Image (cartoon, rainbow, N blue to C red):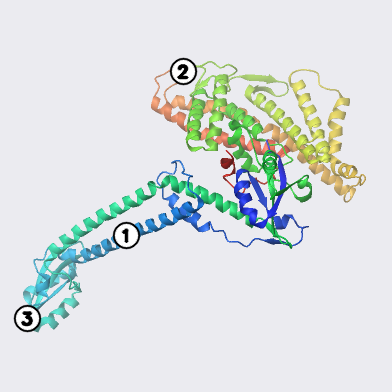
Amino acid sequence: MIVKMKFLSISGPQTDIDRVSNVYLSKYEMQLENAITELKTTDNLMPFMDVNPYREPLAKAEQYVEMLPDKTVPMDLSLSEGEVLEFIREINHDYLDLKVTQEKLKKEKQEIKEKHRLLAPFQRLNVNLSEVRNYQYMKVRFGRISLDYYQKLEKYLYDELKAIFLESSRDENYVYGCYYVANAETGKIDSVFRSLHFEKVKIPEEYEGRPGIICRDMRKQMKKLNEQIKKNKEELGSYLTNRAAKLLGARYYLEEQYNNFDVRKMAARMENEQEDYYILCGWMSEKDVEAFLKETEDDDRISIIVEEGREQMFGEPPTKLKNPKFFQPFEMFIRMYGLPAHDELDPTIFVALTYTFIFGAMFGDVGQGLCLFIGGGLLYLIKKMNLAGIISIAGIFSIFFGFMYGSFFGFEGTVIKPLWLSPRETMMKLPFLGQLNTVFIVAVAFGMGLTMLAMVFQIINAKKRGDKTEMLFSANGVAGLVFYGFLVLTIALFMTGHKTPGNILLVVFLGIPVIIFLMKEPLRSLMEGKGLKIKGSKKMFAVQGFFELFETMLSYFSNTISYVRVGAFAVSHAAMMEVVLMLGGITDGMGTPNWIVIVLGNIFVCGVEGLIVGIQVLRLEYYEMFSRFYRGSGREFQPFNSHAKENFR
C-alpha cells in the first residue's frame, strides 16, 4: 500500500534550527523540499550560506571504516560530539604516523633492493671492491656483455688483448664480470670493449669488501625490513580493529549530524526587525505528522503548519510503499517499472500473487521447486537480496503445481501421481477448434480473468484521479470491461455447448461500447461542459477512430492469446525433462539411470528454464497487465535523515 503523506511547514528562530533537527527531525522520516522554491508567495526569503563543519570528520570516519575487516561489530554510541571529533583526530594522527613509518620502511627496502639488483650479478667475483679501486698500476672495469659478443671477446683476449676478463655470472642474454687492464693499455682496451658493446656498471664507492658478502648483508637487511613492514601492517590492522566499535559509532553520529546540519541546503531564512527565522518544508507520513505534532505541542520555539490539499496546488507528494514483509521483495519489480503516484493503487501484492502463481504454473516441479525455495530462501536470509526472496516464494508455487502435474525432478507420474492433470497428455475437445491441450485452454481462461481484473483496477485508479472519461469511456474502463466481459462470457458459453446471447444483447453489450470507444474524446468534451465537439474534420475523426478501434481490438486479442505461453512452458518443461531422462538412460520409466546425467540435466533445466520463465512472467506483468491500469509516474520518498527510524526505535 501507499503511505499517505502530509505537507509540513516548520519555522522558528534561526539559531534554533540545529536543536530542531537534532531533537525532532532526527526521529522522523521527512522528505525536505526547497523552501525558497516552494514558498514563492513569501517575500524576503534567503538561502543559508553556512559550510557544514561535519564534512571533513565524516569523510575521515568513512575512510577508516572502509578499512575495517569486520564492519558488523556493535556500534559504540557513548561518545559525545567533542569526544567523537577528538577521536577522529586522534585516529587520523596515529594512523598517519604508522602509515608514514610503513612508507619509510618500504622506501628503504626498495633502495636496498635496487642496490642488490645492481651488485648481485657480480657476487661470485672473488675481489675486494675497496682494494681494486686503489690499484696503482692497473684498472678494473665492471659490466656486462651480450653472449654473442662474448665469444668474440674470448678470441681477442687469447690472441691480441692484454687484459684479463673474470666472469661472475650469466643469464640468457648477458655475461657479467670485470676485466683487468694495465694503465698503459687502458685507452686501447676500453675502446675494444666498447666496440664489443660492453656495458659498464658503476659500482658505488660506498661498497667495501667482496660483492658476495655485501649481497648477503643486503638480503639480511631486506629480510629484517620485511619483518618490520609485516609488524607495521599488523599494528595498522589491529589499531583500527581495536577501535572498530567506536569508529562505527563515530561514523554513525557524524552522518546524523552532517544530515541534520545539511537541512540548511533546503531551508530558507527570513529576516525581520526582531529576530531572524528559518523555514523548512517537506513531506512526512500522516502517522509521523501526528506523533510530531504531539511531541512539539508544548515547545513554543517551533511553529508547524500542516497544509491540506498541497498536491492539488503544488504537485504530487512522493511515494512511500509499505507492504507486509512477505511481499516486500516484489517492490523491486514495481521500482523497475516506476513507483505508483499517490492517486494510484499499489500493485505490489497483486504482482506478488500473480507472478508467483504464473511462475509455478509454467515451472511446476516438486523437486526443482523445493531447490528454488531453499536456495532462494537461504540467499535472501544471508544476503538480503530481493530477487532471492522472489525466487524462494515462486518455488512454493512450483512445488504446488508440481503436485498438480505429478512432476518430481522430471519424473512425470511415476514418483508422485498428478492431483490434477499431466500437461503433455491431457486434452480437451472444443467446438470449432477441435482437440487442444487442456493447460492451453485453462491458461487463456486465466488470462481473460486477469485482463478483466486489470480493467477493474483501471476503473479504480481513474476514479482516484478524478478522470471520469477514462473511468467510463476508455477501452480499459467501464465500457471496455462491459465489452470484453460480455465477449468472454459469450465465448465461454459457446465453448461449453450452452446457448449464446441473442442479437439484441450482442448489440447492447458489444455495439454500444464500440460506439463509446469511438466517441471517447467528444464525450470527454461533453463532460467538461464544452459540448459534444469533434476536433478536426469528421473524415479524419472517422479514419483515426477506425484505426484506434482496430488497435484496441487487436490488443484485446493479442493480450489474451499471450497467456498461451503459460501452458506452453508447462508443456515444454515436461518435454525438456523427458529428454534429460532419455539421455540419463530412462525411457517410459524403465532402464538403468545414469544419475550424473540426470542431476546435471536437472541443474541445467532448473537454471536456464527458470531464468526464461521468470523473464516471461515479468513480461506478462508489464505488458499484459500493467499496460491496462498502471502508469508508474510516482517519485520515490527520500527522507533527508537515513537514521530517522533507527533513532525513533
Percent x, y of residue 189: 13, 79
Tell me whether the residue at label 3 lies in contact with that at label 2, contact meaning CB atoms closer than 8 angstroms.
no
Residue that lies at the very extreme toward the right in this rendered image:
531
Percent x, y of residue 645: 59, 41
Percent x, y of residue 594: 39, 24
Residue 53 location, quadrant: bottom right
- Answer above or below: position of 125 versus 508: below
For residue 101, the mark is 1
Instruction: Give amino acid for label 2.
Output: Gly
Q: Distance between the residues labelled 1 and 2?
A: 73 Å
Percent x, y of residue 21: 62, 50
- Answer above or below: position of 257 versus 558: below
* Quadrant of the image containing the N terminus: top right
Q: Name the residue under label 3.
A: 137
What SS does tag 2 mark? loop
Q: Name the residue under label 2.
A: 589
Who comes first in sequence, dot 3 or dot 1?
Answer: 1
In the rendered image, is residue 53 in sight? yes
Residue 634 location, quadrant: top right
State which mark lies toward you, 3 or 2: 3
Left or right of residue 27: residue 156 = left
- Answer above or below: position of 308 versus 607: below
In this view, the residue in front, 156 or 509, is 509
* Quadrant of the image containing the C terminus: top right
Who comes first in sequence, dot 1 or dot 2?
Answer: 1
The structure residue drawn at horizontal position 53% and vertical position 50%, both measured from the top left corner, is 255
In this view, the residue in front, 351 or 213, is 213
Q: How far apart are marks 3 and 1 (CA)?
A: 48 Å
How many marks on residues?
3
Instruction: Give amino acid for label 1.
Output: Thr
What SS does tag 1 mark? helix
